Structures are given as structure tokens and as C-alpha cells.
Amino acid sequence: NNFRKLPDSVTQLVNLTSLTLSDCTELQELPRGLSKLQNLLQLNLSGCSKLQKLPTGISKLTNLLSLHLDICENLQELPRDMSKLVKLRELRLDGCFQLR
């Protein structure tokens, strides 16, 4: 789990419903094209301690039910248009000490 960037090819997995990247402690960024994963229901980024921000396109994941960002110690902000995630039922942010 020591990769710094998720390969862009992941964005081609358009039927993916769950993506777990927990404890990828070196992960610093997610691909901009993550918004292509329209069927994604769960995104788990717990423990991705070097992740500083989410891609702005994350708000296009309108089927997302669960977003785990706990222990993302360097996460500084959430995208402003997260309110578009109208189906979101679970958002975990505990341990996000840099979040403003």
C-alpha cells in the first residue's frame, strides 16, 4: 500500500460499486477522473494520512452512500459542492486534524 497516486486506469472501471484504499499511507492524490465512477456506492480512504484534498469531481458521484475519510490526518478541506452528494448517508471524518 505504498503508492502515492492511484493509476488513472482505475477511472475506467465504471461498474465499480466499492473502492477501498484504506491505510494507503503514501497516497497523496486521487485521479481527477474519479468522477467517472458513477456507480460507486462506497469510497473508503481511511488512514490515507498523506491525502491533502479530494478531487473536485467527487461531487459527481451522486450514487455515493458512504465516504470514509477518518484518520486522513493531512486532509485540509472538502470540495465546496459536496452538497450534491444527495444520497450520502455516512461521512466519517474523525482524526482529520487539518480539516478547516
Image: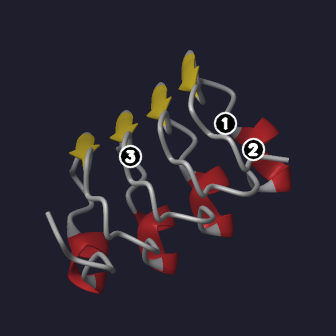
Please give the residue where the numbered disc 2 appears in the rendered image: 82
Question: Mark 1 = which residue?
Answer: 85
Q: Amino acid at mark 1?
A: Leu
Residue 36: percent from left, percent from top: 43, 66
Q: Nearer the viewer, residue 29 or 26?
A: 26
Spatial CA distance of label 2 from label 3 is 16 Å
The residue at the point 56 percent across, 15 percent down is: 89
**Residue appearing at x 74%, y 51% in the figure:** 78
Alpha carbon distance from label 3 to label 1: 17 Å
Discs 2, 1 touching: Cβ within 8 Å = yes
Q: Name the one closer to the observer, 62 or 9.
A: 9
**Residue at figure coordinates x 37%, y 33% from the top left:** 41
Q: What's the mark number on residue 43?
A: none
Identify the residue position indicated by label 3 in the image. 45
- In front: 47, or 65? 47
N-terminal of the pair, mark 3 or mark 1, is 3
Q: Dividing the image into 4 quarters, which one contains the N terminus?
A: bottom left
Residue type (three-letter) at the residue carrying disc 2: Met
Give the secondary structure at mark 2.
helix
In this rendering, the answer to whether 40 lies above or below 79 is above
Seen in the image, is 34 located left or right of residue 19?
A: right
Give neighbour class at mark 1: few <14, some 14-19, many 20+ (Cα, 10 Å): some
How many C-alpha atoms fall within 10 Å of the one at disc 2: few (<14), some, or many (≥20)?
some
Give amino acid for label 3. Leu
